[in-house]
Structure formats: C-alpha cells, structure tokens
Amino acid sequence: MTIGVLFGGPTPEHDISILTGLQALQELGRSNRDAVGLYWTKTGSFFVVASDVEAESFLDGLPKGSSEVSLRLGDDGGFFVGGRLGKDRRLDLEAVVLGTHGGPGEDGTIQAALDLAGLNYTGPSVAGAALGMDKWAFGAVVSAAGLATLPRALLDGSTESLPFDGPYILKPRFGGSSIGIDVVADLATARARLSSNVHLARGCVVEPFRQDLTDVQIALRTYPSISLSAIERPIRRSASAEILDYADKYVGGEGMVSAPRELPAVLAPGQREAVELATRTIAKVASVRGVARVDFLASDTELYVNEINTIPGSLSKHLFVDPPLSFAELLGDLIAEARERPAHRFSSAGADGLVLRKAGSIAAKLA
C-alpha cells in the first residue's frame, strides 16, 4: 500500500510545511517505500504532486503535473483522484504522514476530517492537536499538572490591568511557531497591537517578557514507547534579539534542520533531568501522539514550560542523536503507530433504539 505525505494548508506556516513534507516524501522514496505527495493549497484544495518535486516548484503555485484530488468522508472515504470516463479512483493509503504545521493542519481540523474519512494518520489526535495549539488551555493543563510556567493572562480591548508588570510578550492564542509574537513595554501598546497584528485576531495571550531566559527544546516520540531526544538550545541570530523568531528557525532552507543550535545543550546541574521529567509528564497530560517538541524557557536557576509543537518542523528528526535515530526509522515508527494505534475510531455503542421506541410523536412534543 501507499504512504501519503500531506503538507501545506491555509496557514502562515504553509512554506515551512512544504519543506517538512518534501523531506519526509523523499526519505520514504530513498527507503523504497511507495509514497505520494498530497499538497494542500493555501486556498484549501488538495493535489497529488510528484514524489521528486522540489521546494522551488511551489513558488508560482502548483508544481507542473499536479492532479487535483478530493477528500471524502464516510465509510468509503479517503482521497479520490479523477479517472477516465468520469470515474474517480480512491487512493489506497496505508497511512498519511502529516507535515502540516500551524492552522487547520495542527489544531485538530484536518485530524477530524481524516478521522471521519477513516484514514490512519501520524501525529496528534484531534484532542491533542487542539490542546497543543491553544496556548491558554495548554498552559492551564501544564500548571494543573504541577509544572512551572510563566504567569499568563488573556488580553482583549477591555483589559484595564494585568496581574504582572511589563514589559510584556504577546502571543497568538491559537498559533504555532513564532509568527505574530510581539514584545511591548506597556499595556497601552499591548492593546493597540490587538488591532494592528492580524495574528492576534482570534485571541491573545500575554506573559511577562523575560529577556534573561533562553530557549531550551526537547523532542519526544510515543512509538514504540515514549522516548526523548537530546536537548537543544537554539541560537538566536543576534545576542540582542528579543525572541527566537521565525527567521531564526527556518530561513536556512531546510526547515529546523538548518537552524543554528547548541546540541546537546549545556545546562545547569540537574536541569536535564528536570526537562526530561517535565516532558514525560506533558506526554501524559497533553495526549501527545507521534513526534512532538516541547519548548522551555530557562536560566541557570529557573525552568519554565513554554509551549508544545505537536507537529514540529522537520519532525524534529535532527534532535534524535543520542542514541542516533535515522529519519527512515523515525518515519517507519510513525507509520506503524498510525496503523496499529489509530488516533480515533467512532462507536455507536449504546445507541440501541430504546429512546426512539419510547419517543412517540415528535409533532406532539412541539405543540
């Protein structure tokens, strides 16, 4: 059977999603796996693309030779491509590898559609994806699990005060990566950003900005059992940069693989153990599935959980160095998990008709 690799989508992270998808697609080809690229356009359509397509082919829209497919739900659902004489052909997919960063590809939307279509897929379930994309909800869950986080508050136009002093960092409540993040000095400026920053339109989470803290990241995978990667410290372009931004992560041309980093990170005594313990806790309380990356903020004396990326850039393949794990093996385990441990299977157990038999006349109930 064929492996589908889905990437792109109507999201600000569309371009980096293409890079992750193409890396997975070509690695599967090198591993002699039958794989097909499923490109999700910025406007929401799906197309089959050649397995050897390169990133630059997407600069002007669709790569040459692309064929449109449709995603259908139900018992006979799946991806269908138009055939001769008007008869559509269903793609026989063993599983779909998700390289869909941000937006509907990482917030549970595409996961729900694939569940309804009866397709196996890698990465988070609907619930895990939705929780990971909601910075407010994820912070609350992490805090309830006893893990340290920076204080957070929701910000809207009516907010008159915050429970902590500035400067502040503003983050889209529903968003991945560093897109849309703003650092401001005071509440008045923060409120003004709500109308000028399009990424804050669906909600804004505000935290105290701590320039003394640096980024520390670790990946985990859940199949065949929970295992952790080495810990990295991403390096910012400039020592004076306020945050690790989108350019720091992705402008090298290979997604997260080409971003500068300290790997393994040099940490304060006991901090590696604390990061690993917190990550294992998050794997349980946040319904992690597949490969995810957990981001922390740290100093020599403090450690805070920052956020989770449930479909990380390049699927965090570059972090599994101790012990070494090849990209082919990582993908193989993701596919095996998708097949053997489906994210969801619906059940109508309990719908035995008893309520319907006793319902009587609906019209009489409306009288």
Image (tube, rainbow, N blue to C red):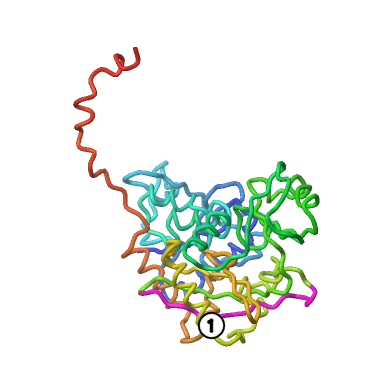
Q: Quadrant of residue 133?
A: bottom right
Q: Secondary structure at mark 1?
A: helix
Task: State left or right for residue 160 relative to residue 46.
Answer: right
How far across and how far down the image is residue 162, in percent?
A: 70, 53
Please identify the quadrant where the C terminus is shown.
top left
Q: Which residues are magenta?
A: 225-240
Q: Which residue is mark 1?
A: 272
Which residue does the image show at 49% across and 66% down from the upper left?
A: 146
Q: Is residue 350 visible?
A: yes
Q: Is residue 25 visible?
A: no
Which residue does the image show at 53% across and 57% down from the upper left?
A: 140
Please identify the quadrant where the N terminus is shown.
bottom left
Foreground of the two, 218 or 101: 218
Which residue does the image show at 76% across and 60% down from the upper left?
A: 166
How far across and how far down the image is residue 23, in percent?
A: 54, 71
How far across and how far down the image is residue 289, in percent?
A: 42, 65
Foreground of the two, 163 or 169: 163
Residue type at mark 1 is Arg
Foreground of the two, 328 or 205: 205
**10 Å crowding of disc 1: few (<14), some (14-19), many (20+):** some
Q: Quadrant of residue 2?
A: bottom left
Q: Which residue of the protein is positioned furthest toward the top in this rendering?
A: 367
Q: Is residue 304 magenta?
A: no
The correct choice, above or below, for 49 with respect to 196 in the image is below
Which residue does the image show at 67% across and 79% down from the upper left?
A: 260
Task: State left or right for residue 261 relative to residue 85.
Answer: right
The correct choice, above or below, for 288 with respect to 224 in the image is above
Foreground of the two, 66 or 145: 145
How far across and how far down the image is residue 66, in percent?
A: 55, 55
